[in-house]
Amino acid sequence: MSDKPNFIVFMSDDQGHRDLSCMGATDFQTPNFDRIASRGAKLTRWYSNAPICSAGRCGILTGCYPIAAGIPGNVGVTADGLSPDLPTIPKALKKLGYQTCMSGKWHLGNREPFLPHNHGFDHWFGFTNGCIDYYSHIFYWALSSQNQARHDLWEDGKEVYHNGTYFVDLMRDKTIEYIQKAKNNGRPFFIYVPFNTPHYPLHAPEEYMERYAHLPRSRQLMTAMLTVMDDAIGKILDELERLDLFDNTCIFFQPDHGPSREPRNWTDGTDLPYPGGDTGGLRGHKGTLWEGGIRVPTLMSWPARVQGGKTIDEIGIGMDIFPTILTAAGGDPEQYNLDGTDILPMIADNAPSPHGDLFWTQGPKGNTRVIQRDRYKLLLEGNEIHLSNLNTDPNETTNIAGDEPDLTNDLLTRLNEWHASVT
C-alpha cells in the first residue's frame, strides 16, 4: 500500500449537535463514533456550510460556499445539479494517483451530467435524490412532475435492484468492498460515505427499536437510527483495523446540518413537529441559520498524524475538508479557487482557527444571511437583525445589536458586500 494517507469522509443526514455519546448524549451510546473521537479529535465549534442537504454536501465536496458553487439550497427532482466543471475532492485526488469511490446519498443531481461519475468518482453506489424508503429504495417525497414514485438505487450509473434489503447494510457492505479492493491494488483511496440516516423515513429495524423501547417514541426513533449508523461505521472501522489501514487513514465525520423538525419523521402519521433530535440547547434546527441548524457534531481521526482524545474548540467549517485533505495528500490548494482553509494545523498542532469572517445563506435568493466573526454572529432575516456573542450566549437568546451599533453596522456592511460578490 502507498505511504500516502487514505481518506474516508462520513456524513450523516439531519443530526443534532449532542446526538453522539462523545458529544454529550446520555440516553444512548455511540461506541464507534466515540472510537473515532478517541483515536483523534472531536470538534465542538464546527459548522456545516448550510442548514439544508444539497448545499451542505456541496460545501464539503467543492471546498466553496454553496451559493458560489451554484447550489444555494436543495437540488429538486427536475433541477440542474452540481456543475461537472467545478473542482471536487475526488477530482483533485485522482490527479495525485488516488482511487475514488462513493457509497450513499448523492442529492447533487439525479441525471446526466450531474451524477457522481462526472465529479471524479471512479465507482459509486447509492441514490441520487433527497431520501428513499430504506427497504424498497423508492423515492416518494417531493414527487416528480408526473406524481409518480420512482425507484432510486444505482451503481456506476446503472439502476440496480435490492428490494427488501436494508439500505444502510447495502452501503456499508459496498464501502467495505471498496476498501478491500483498494488494499489489493495498493493505491491510496478516497471514499465518500454519505449516510441517509437519520433522515426520514425513520425505518430502524425492529431489534433497534426494541433496544430503545423505554424512551419516548420520538427519541426512540432517533436513537435507533443513530445506532444503526454507529454499528455500520463500526464494521467499516473494523475492516480498516483488520487490513492494517486505520492508522494511516484520515477520517472525517460531519452531519450535513442540524436535526429535522419535519412531521415526516414520525412513522405513525402524527402531524406535529418532530422533536427527536438533540441540539444540546442550541437554538434552531434544519432549515434555519441559528446554531442548531448549522453547528454540527464533527470528528476527525488520523492516528499517524493526530494525537488521540483531543477536543478542538476552534472554528471550522465543511468547506475546510477539501483543502485539508488535498494538503495531506501532497497537493496544493492554491491551484484551486477554494473558500475553505487547511485546518490540519488547528487539529494536529493546536494552532488557532485560520478563519476570519464566515458566511451563510438560506433560501434561493439568500434572503436569510449570516456573518460570523470569531465570537460574534449576525443573522439578517429580511429587515430583522440579530447579533449574538456566542462565547457568552451560545444559544442566541439575547439580541445585542442595539448595544453594539458600530459592530453591527460593520458586520452588516461586510455581509452584504460578500453576498453581492457571490450572486
Image (tube, helix red, strand yellow):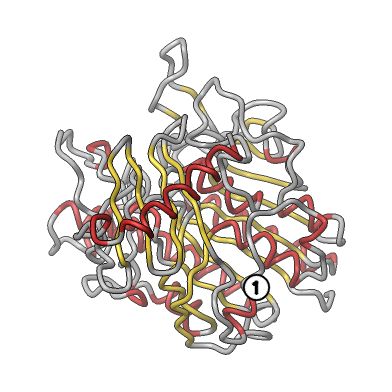
Q: Nearer the viewer, residue 162 or 417?
A: 417
Q: Is residue 110 left or right of residue 29?
A: right
Q: At x 16% / y 60%, what residue is drawn?
A: 213
Q: How many marks?
A: 1
Q: Is residue 211 left or right of residue 423?
A: left
Residue 130 percent coordinates (x, y): 46, 36
Q: At x 55% / y 51%, what residue is drawn?
A: 171
Q: Quadrant of residue 380?
A: top left
Amino acid type assigned to the residue bearing label 1 in the image = Cys
Q: At x 75% / y 54%, what residue is drawn?
A: 100
Q: Disc 1 marks which residue?
A: 250
Give neighbour class at mark 1: few <14, some 14-19, many 20+ (Cα, 10 Å): many
Q: Is residue 192 above or below residue 156?
A: below
Residue 330 percent coordinates (x, y): 82, 70
Q: For the N terminus, which image quadrant?
A: bottom right
Residue 214 percent coordinates (x, y): 13, 64
Outermost front residue: 406
Q: Quadrant of residue 246?
A: bottom right
Q: Nearer the viewer, residue 99 or 326?
A: 326
Q: Nearer the viewer, residue 200 or 319?
A: 319
Q: Is residue 226 left or right of residue 104?
A: left
Q: Nearer the viewer, residue 331 or 137?
A: 331
Q: Is residue 410 left or right of residue 99?
A: left
